[in-house]
Image (cartoon, rainbow, N blue to C red):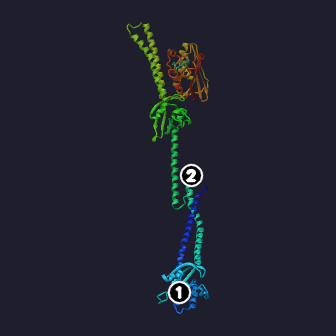
Amino acid sequence: MLKLSLQWKWFLGLTGLLVALLLLVILCLNMFLPPFLMKRIQQDLERNGRLVHHLTAPLLAATPLNTNEVNNLAHALGRQVGLRITLIRRDGTVVGESDKPPYELAGIENHLLRPEVQDALNRGIGVARRHSDTVHASLLYVALPALPPGAYAPQGVVRVGLPLHSIAETTSRVRRIVVVASLIVALIDIPFLFWLARRYSAPIDAMRTMARRVAHGDFAARAPYRVSGELGELGVALNDMAGQLETRLRELDEEKAGLAGILSSMTEGVLVTDAAGRIRLINRALREQLQLTDEAIGKTPLEALRNIELEQLIASPAARELTFLTPGERTFAVNAAALQNNAGTVVVFHDISRLKQLENIRKEFVANVSHELRTPLSIIKGYVETLLESPPPDAATSRQFLETIQRHSHRLERLVEDLLNISGFESQRAQLEFAPVGLRDLADAVIEELAPQAREKNMTVAVEMPDALPFVRADRERLRQVFTNLLDNALKYTPDGGRVGVSARLAGEEIECCVSDNGPGIAAEHLPRIFERFYRVDKARSRELGGTGLGLSIVKHIVQAHGGRVWAESAPGQGSRFCFTLPRA
Ligand code: ADP
């Protein structure tokens, strides 16, 4: 169907209304004008009849009657007032007839029985509309009894007549005038109506377009505001509304962006489900922690994470520790809270895997320390008790016992020293005093200190460093401990007659230093763990040699505190090489 614009609808509507009104006017005129005109004409005819009566009644009453005079008067009056005038005697003889020549007067039929004549004589006035046989035309007659002054009975009848065709002519002329006037009104009004429809429909059209644009999200759209009256006010209200919507939406957008920013920068994982229990949102942290992708959106947490405990937690929100197996084992403190109006649930995942790990390490450490302390202590206690027994052992045995007690006391001392060192680093209380340190001097000094040990095992220690080796930036005493621990291990674990080497070279901005030996080497499975606290390849042998299991761990702590790296290269039977880097001074 043809879709008309608002302007055309209004224009056609208004034009239709106008045409209908004009037709109604014409219809009313058609209905009411002819009877009204007829009545007016009849009244005119009556007045004219009375005038004619006034002029002719005395003549009709005169005796003898001068027929010529009467007939002439009828002719003269008929011409002047434009009516047919008939003067009739009491007996019905026509003595004056304006529409017939005088010579035909005698031939006119007696009019006594004409209804208007009868009415005039009997009722005082007679009105009739009928065909006249005398003049062969339809006429409207008004007849009055001729009552000249002084007469008591009618002396005849005075009749005036108007041809009906002249009445119809008048009516149709009036009708024509009305129709022409209506057409003129319509022609003048149509452009005006067109203008009117355009004037009021254009702003409405513009507002409709604007409202549609706003509905589609274009909040910059504005209605025309230079319109007066209610339409103008409507436009202003619409513009206000669009402006408010724009502001509100901008605020919402900003809020959303802020929220998204907070969510994505959170280190805690966040998962939000909708009212149907399907995942609506997962933040960046959770994606990384549990290796989730957008595929999880729209699924239930059970489908996406395969964890029945999480499903139960979401069903009855609470806080709980949960372990997930993807990708590796991770423990989370999970907090679930229902959103308002049952709109879903927010679940926050706090990764406590590291805390758990640290707690385990701490427990293990305490157990290790206790174990390490208990062995020498129980040995010392045993020997002391034996020495105190009576009778006391002989002098040689006592000395042997005392030497054992001394050895284990030394071991306890070393252990406590090493532990203090480590705890100092872990609590980061140890302040390093950095200064340029020459590695060759330091290595030489440590080798000098350990010379008796080397001599005892008949071992050689060679230092191989370029003369122009730059100084390193280090805490001299700590670095001395690194050399001591590494050289001590090399001398300890390498069999008699072995060789130990200390080398250093410049590598970029760092200096790489290595302590190597041609001892038994370390199997590949142990290599990654030898820097851990209390880790020993061969526990019994280490203890026997006076080791605490903490030497390499201390080395690692010191080197890392200097900003360097430490590693070991070794293979069984191939000797070992312990290397570390330090920044140049
Ligand atoms: P320990 O006090 O037992 O020497 P460390 O932390 O110094 O403790 O060393 C850890 C373990 O690494 C030792 O128990 C030993 O098994 C192994 N190890 C260290 N240095 C060497 C080396 N030069 N040759 C062979 N094994 C070594």
Respond yes or no on whether mark 2 lies under 8 Å from ligand 1.
no
Q: Which of 175 and 232 is in front in this view?
A: 175
Q: Which of 99 and 547 is in front in this view?
A: 99
- Quadrant (top left/top right/bottom left/bottom right) for the N terminus: bottom right
Residue bearing mark 1: 91
Secondary structure category for the residue under label 1: loop
Q: Which of 456 and 408 is in front in this view?
A: 408
Q: Nearer the viewer, residue 381 or 194?
A: 194
Q: Residue 176 location in percent, x, y?
A: 59, 73
Respond yes or no on whether mark 1 lies under 8 Å from ligand 1.
no
Between marks 2 and 1 in the image, the one whose residue lies nearer the viewer: 1
**Disc 1 marks which amino acid?**
Asp
* Above or below 417: residue 242: below
Residue bearing mark 2: 213
Q: Can residue 423 be seen in this view?
A: no
Q: Residue 321 location in percent, x, y?
A: 46, 30
**Disc 2 marks which amino acid?**
Arg
Q: Residue 553 location in percent, x, y?
A: 52, 23
